[in-house]
Each structure stands twice: as C-alpha cells, then as structure tokens.
Amino acid sequence: MSLPLEGLSAIVTGAGRGLGRAEALELARLGAAVVVNDYGQPGRDGSGEASAAPAEEVAAEITAAGGRAVAHLGDVSDFETARGLVDLAVAEFGKLDVLVNNAGILRDRMIFSMGEDEWDPVIRVHLKGHFNTTHFAAVHWRGRAKAGEAGVYGRIVNTSSEAFLAGSAGQPNYAAAKGGIVGLTTSTALALAKYGVTANAICPRARTRMTEDVFAGFAEPAGEDELDPLSPEHVAPLVGYLASPAAARVNGQLLVVHGGMVAIVERPRVAAKFDTAKEVFGFEELDGLLSPYFAERPPNETFAAAEVLGLKKG
C-alpha cells in the first residue's frame, strides 16, 4: 500500500525545532522527501548566531527512519535565500510539490512601547518570509503548467495564529503579520487554483520554544504516558492531510488546530447593516443608529479564542 505523500517532495521552513520539526517528520512519515529549512538561531527573537545543526539533526532523523531529506540553512525573509531554497528542492528531488511555511520569531511589546526594531523583523520573517517562498514556489508550478505539464501538483500550508483572530495585546507586530498571512493565503489560493495548486492556512496551538510563556498555566499532561494537549504532534497530521491529494478540494481555508480538535473558520460575515434615510449619512443619523447598537453589546467585544474553542488554564 502506497503512502499518501509517496513520490512528493516538500519544503518545511523553520523545521529545526518545535512545530516545524513535527511537521517535517510527519510529511516524511507519510512518504514525502523533505527539505528541512531552519536558520538555527537560538533566540526566539531571532537573536544569536545562525547554525545548521537544528536542520541537519531533523534531516538526519528522517534519513535514519528510512526517509529522504536534505537540510537547508537560511533566512527565508531574504528573497534570494528563498529562491535558493526552492531551487534546492528541485535539484535534489526533481520538483517541488509541497510548501509548508512555518518560520517565525517573536519580539513582544505593547503598541505604545514597540519600536521599529521590534516591529520590522517580525513582519519581515513571518509575512515577507511567507511571501518569498510562496513566490518562488508559484513561479515553479506556473512554469511547469505553461510548459504543458499535465496535472501539476502543488500544496501550500501557511501558518497564521489566533493572535490575528482574537487579538493579542502584547503582540501587535505578530498579530498583524499573522493577519497578513491569511490575506496572502486567500489571494494565493485564487491565483494558483487553475494550475492545480491549493493554499490554506492553519492557526495552531502548540507548546514550543516560541510559546512556552504564552501557554504557561494551561493544561499539561496528567502523566508520563499522556500526550501534551499542546504538543506539536497534534498539529502535524493536519498539515500532512492538507499536503495530500485527499485535500484537493480544500483551498483558501483557515483552520484552527490543537489537542485533537480542528475548527474551520468562516470568513467574516456582516453583523448588522444600516442605510441612510437621506442621500448621505450625517453625524446625527449615524449616532442615532450606531450608538444604540453598540450600547447593547458587551464592552470591548473581542472574543477570547481560548474560551470559544475550549482551551482552559489549570
């Protein structure tokens, strides 16, 4: 019996640790040949010397289990590095079929305290990094289709966050980047569908080096044999599914995933609509329509995603 991803090749960015590592191992387990990308900096804020060791260790783990993998050291927020990453996949495995964008950093601070040195790098690594790799993967797939190849196969899985959905007071840079990734994903899904490519985004909850303080106090395993509900291993199977032929009809979607749960998020819907009784709205008319509407709603009504989707502290 063949494996779901047998004969396919994949790139996973930020795959040296945590979530990206779990995703790379899952894709390999399902039969894909994997390019394991990581910049290898020790600091979750993108600080420290770059190191090939994390990517090389994951690639070696895949190889030792009988799979195919190659390590790539590089910062995907650099345009030419992203080009080289896609070129490496094609050179090593003959083509690229799957792109999983996961690389990211954190530089948390409240909006009134945040400076350019905290805003720019987070936007660059998350949002520009997703764009860079997506661009070169799209060029690869479109080129094959234009050359007359029938049945071009392409899958993109991007990593957003519930920080974009529910807000995150101390992460305006991260929330903005993750919201931008959703917009990039839906645009890409529309642009590449005719070439046989799908693009989807996930909002994972996982206890990793980047999120260890975010999830401090949330439910942890009761015993040594129990899997952490916030383990990256809960997220990786969804990535494997979205990368597979089985997900051919899944395109432009946003999915929240953690601890044995997958939630499909609808696009925003209109909550209320008001029409002017005149040709143009005036202040008084808007005040008479909108102020009563918001007065009846709870103050600061932004939903707490952790409560809505069932993640509890303690």
Image: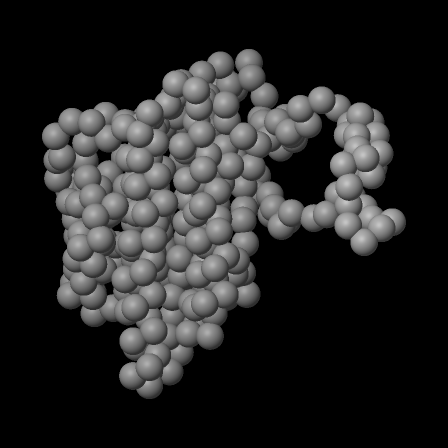
- 181 in relation to 300, above or below: below
Image spot of residue 58 (x, y percent): 22, 41
Residue 59 appears in the rendering: no
Q: Residue at x 40, y 78 (%)?
A: 151
Q: Is residue 220 left or right of residue 297?
A: left
Q: Residue at x 35, y 79 (%)?
A: 145
Residue 134 appears in the rendering: yes
Question: Seen from this angle, which residue lies furthest right?
Answer: 277
Specify the quadrant of the image occupied by residue 43.
top left
- 237 in relation to 41, above or below: below
Image spot of residue 308 (x, y percent): 65, 31
Q: Residue at x 27, y 28 (%)?
A: 117
Q: Is residue 306 left or right of residue 161?
A: right
- 231 in relation to 14, above or below: above
Q: Quadrant of the C terminus?
A: top right
Q: Residue at x 18, y 62 (%)?
A: 87
Question: Seen from this angle, which residue lies furthest bottom?
Answer: 148
Return the residue nearer the eye: 17 or 133.
133
Return the residue nearer the eye: 117 or 182.
117
Image spot of residue 205 (x, y percent): 47, 33
Image spot of residue 30 (x, y percent): 36, 55
